[in-house]
Amino acid sequence: MNLKSINLITVLVILFTSLMATAQVTVDEKDNLLKNSDIAPEVLEATKVTEDGRIKIDGVAAVVGDYLVLESDISKAYLDMKNQQVGEITYCDVAETIMENKLFAHHAKQDSLPFNPARVESFTQQQISQFISQVGSMERLLEFYKIDTESELREQLNEINTQRMLAEEMQGSIVDEVEITPEETRDFFEAIPEDEIPLINDEVELAQIIVRPKVGEKERQAVIDKLNSYREDVLSGGSFATKAVLYSEDRGSRSSGGKITLTRDDNYVKEFKDAAFSLREGEVSNPFETEFGWHILTVDKIRGQQVDVRHILLYPEISSEAIEKAEEEIEKVRELIVDGKVSFKDAAREVSDEKETRESGGQLINNATGDRRFELTKVDPAIYGQVIDLKENEVSPVIKDTEPRTAKVFFKLITVTKKVPEHIAEFSEDYTRIRELALQQKKLKEINTWKEEKVKDTYIKINGDYKTCEFAKSWIKE
């Protein structure tokens, strides 16, 4: 099952009921009833209670170790996957997927795998920010899910994300040391029947040059002055959180008063982490610059290697003159490339404002595969429209675009450095792709072997119609 195709709102709907079923449970084998005292109140509401105060098992589809799987978990997940058009699925498919995740999470706890709660809180904050961007405000989000307070929402999301991340940690530990040799890759490829060798769709290799309008000293100083005025007001007793809500241009944290929880290992820019870990509780930083703009930051609480901070982010205004100048600059660069006076690669190294690609001559890397090739039908729709008609080594017209995070204007040139037409996979030509397929198959075998072993020594009970599912044969102990 490909649960990754479900958006975050859908995942929240699917998992809200699941998080309620995390208590250790006891099943009375004599009459197939769960003891009332073992079940959370929220689960009681979703099930039927017998006259003697016990819970009819037909409200619980399965028990896996420390976790319950409610029938409502499966029903909601099934309906949401159908709405998301996640291929052909059955209730049995959904039940198996949920039970597998519970199995992984259960054994991650049993094995005491290293687990960072700060990572959960950081991810929860990102989720809430994305939810709010979809529904409009925290108030509407709470109303949508019929939850009274933001803290209650965070607590429930943290429960959900803890279980999910435990499952990920367990799977990662199973396959961490799995590697694939060239010989195994060749054996994998040669074992594929000739009529089943995969078809590789049209692919392209891309490079780009980015030119951003330069911030003027006047605009830069205006932002610093604003942040200093906010800082002075906070030091005089004003609320940092209120100012973040009113003035911060960080859409992700603004609604929560600029609050971010992070550790030194989290993926934040160096300047931000340096500020976060150099202050004492209650201190407010001076304005500092990152690639995202200008910030002031205060530390709410220090908890060992984890800190709760609040920040205000401002972007300097870009003058119309600076925008015009950037456009003129990239037009001249394009003219030099088209006239053959400079190569695209050398121009990128000389003028591109994109640090990640500048040294490689603007070459883009596909994060999904780690190589240079992009399947044409899977590239970002915006990029697809910009490159579909380009010939190999042809340079696009100047493209005006905006940063998704800041909505600031920038300009770019794109070229197709190589086109690979649709073809039947060939070992040498498509080695990277074939190696990835072989490695994934090997990892999947390792996970399946682990699952078969753990099912034997884990308390598992499957109820009702789910006993007849094909997968249940290997889960039910005789």
Image (cartoon, helix red, strand yellow):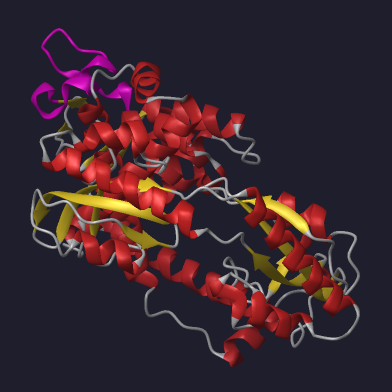
Q: Residue at x 56, y 35 (%)?
A: 90
Q: Quadrant of residue 42?
A: top left
> Residue 70: x and y, percent?
33, 29
Specify whether residue 477 is in view. no
Q: Residue furthest top?
A: 51
Q: Quadrant of residue 392?
A: bottom right
* Residue occupying image coordinates x 80% and y 57%: 386
Q: Is residue 38 magenta?
A: yes
Image location (x, y in percent) of residue 33 = 20, 24
Q: Residue furthest bottom?
A: 183
The number of numbered discs placed on residues in the rendered structure image is: 0
User: In the image, is 235 to the left or to the right of 211?
Assistant: left
Q: Is residue 435 left or right of residue 134?
A: right
- Give percent across and percent down for residue 467: 41, 36
Residue 446 in picture, x, y percent from top left: 43, 71
Q: Nearer the viewer, residue 55 or 383?
A: 383
Q: Give yes or no for residue 39 being in the magenta stretch.
A: yes
**What residue lies at 30% left-to-right and 47% top-to-bottom?**
227
Examine the rendered structure and indicate whether residue 273 appears above or below residue 154.
below
Q: Nearer the viewer, residue 18 or 216?
A: 216
- Do we see residue 175 in this rendering? yes
Q: Residue furthest front?
A: 218
Looking at the image, is 428 positioned above or below residue 246? Answer: below
Answer with left or right where residue 65 lies relative to residue 235: right
Stretch in magenta: 35-63
Return the residue nearer the eye: 25 or 80. Answer: 80
